Every structure is written in structure tokens, then in C-alpha cells.
Image (cartoon, rainbow, N blue to C red):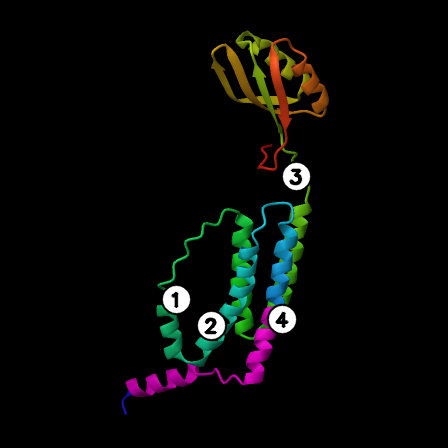
Amino acid sequence: MTFKDIFKDSFLEAVNTGDFSLKHIAAILLITSILAAYIFFVYRFITQKTFYNKNFNISLAAITVIVAAIIMTIQSSIVISLGMVGALSIVRFRTAIKDPMDLVFLFWAISIGIICGAGLFGIAILSSLVLTVGILVLEWLPVSKAPLLLIINSDDKEIKEAVINTIKANTKAFQIKSQTINNGRFDMIVEVRTKTPDELLNAVSSLSGIAKCSLISHDGETTF
């Protein structure tokens, strides 16, 4: 027997540590399923004010269990693990992640599956609790208030200067986002910061030539 054969045998014996009994497998999958359900409900709670995709949430829970099963399988044999890597390398994800928080939950689900598959349940539980507290604290942390969008439609294009002077007198700050003049009509969208939105709306709408005036709030990103 050559040194190469000895090294090969010892390496294969070292990695073939997956002596999982049916009871052990069931325990791992049970704990993983509980944590998967926990991620499911946390995602549902966090996204209750935004667009909620139930299929994506179910996928998060399913991915957690699937990854745990894969990790247990990989631990059983180096040959199987290499075959698994080859098989998974052909998988391509085509679904676009539109919300960064969805990406956070996706990595969370995958990591919990890996950790539980390795049998490190304490790390999985503690990291899930810490991550949940961190997300909730940052979600409720007060940030700069989003500016309002003032949409003005006028039948008189000569009213622009009067509109800007009125906005300046009733706001702390403003920025013109767009303006259009077409066949004598004048349309403008202005980003405004004001503590008295009703007074601003009444002041602008009372100008002669204003056909329509709307004030819209949004939940997008804010600038300081």
C-alpha cells in the first residue's frame, strides 16, 4: 500500500462521520422546522405594512429545511458531497430580489438550515433571536421624516412665479422635481418639507389659475 492509498483511506474515513440514526434525523428536522416557522412569522410581521408575497415566505421556510437535509447528507460521505456540489452548481435563480430585506431573510433561512444541519442548535436559536431583536429595533428607530410631494396643475403658465413664492413662504425647504408646459397648461411636482401641510395646500390652491393641487406622502427613502 502506497502513501497515496493511506492518505486516501484516512481522508475518506475522516469525512464519513454521518452516522445519523432515524431519531437524530427526526430531531434535526423538527428543530429546523420550528425555526423555519419562526422565520415565516417574523417575515410576515415585518412586512405587514408593505407588499407581502406569501409564496416567497413559504419558500423561506422550505429552503431552511431543504438546506438542513443537504448538510446532513453532505456530512455522510465526501463522494456524496462532491456530487451534491456538482448538482447544485447547475441551479440558477431567476427571481429578482426587489426588496433588500427579502435578501436578508433569504440568507437567514439558508444559514439556519446550514447551522441546524450541522447540529449547532444553540447557535441557530441565539442568532435568530439576536437578528429578530436587531431588525425590530432598527425598524422602529426614528429617522428623518419623508418629504411630501406637491402636485400642481394650472391652466395659466404665467402663474409659476406666484406658485414658487407661495411654496417658499409656507415650507422650510422645497425642491422642484419636474415641470411641464403644454398648450398653455402648467404642471409641476415639488418636493416640500413643512409642518403645516394643510396651510400650504390651501395657500397654493387659492391662487387664481390653479386647476388642481394635491399633496402626497410617500414611504420611500429620505434625504437629510
Nearer-N-terminus badge (4/2): 2
Q: Position of residue 219 (x, y in %)?
A: 61, 37
For disc 1, the marked residue is 88
Nearest to N terminus: mark 4 or mark 1:
1
Q: Residues within 10 Å of mark 1 (few under 14, many from 20)?
A: few
Confirm or deny contact between disc 4 and disc 1 (CB under 8 A): no
Circle nearer the N terminus (1, 2): 2
Q: Earlier in the sequence, mark 3 or mark 1?
A: 1
**Numbered disc in front, either 4 or 1:** 1
- For residue 205, say whether it is visible: yes
Residue type (three-letter) at the residue carrying disc 3: Val
Q: Are marks 1 and 2 in contact (CB under 8 Å)?
A: yes
Was residue 221 drawn as part of the magenta stretch in this picture?
no
Label 3 SS: loop
Q: Within the image, what quadrant is residue 221 found in?
A: top right
The residue wearing badge 3 is 143
Residue at 60% from the left image edge and 67% from the top image edge = 124
Q: Magenta span covers which residues?
A: 4-33
Marks 4 and 3 close (CB-CB < 8 Å): no
Q: Pick whichever of labels 4 and 3 is earlier in the sequence.
A: 4
The disc labelled 4 sits on which kind of residue? Gly
- Per the model, the C-alpha gap separating discs 4 and 2 is 20 Å
Q: Nearer the viewer, mark 3 or mark 1?
A: 1
- Count neighbours of disc 2 (C-alpha within 10 A) and say few if under 14, some if 14 to 19, many if 20 or more: some
User: What secondary structure is found at the residue carrying circle 1?
Assistant: helix
C-alpha separation, residue under disc 3 versus residue under disc 2:
41 Å
Distance from label 4 to label 3 (Cα)?
Answer: 34 Å
Check the image and report above or below for 26 versus 153.
below
Q: Residue at x 37, y 79 (%)?
A: 79
**Amino acid under disc 2:** Ile
Instruction: Quarter of the image for the C terminus: give it.
Output: top right
Residue placed furthest toward the bottom: 1
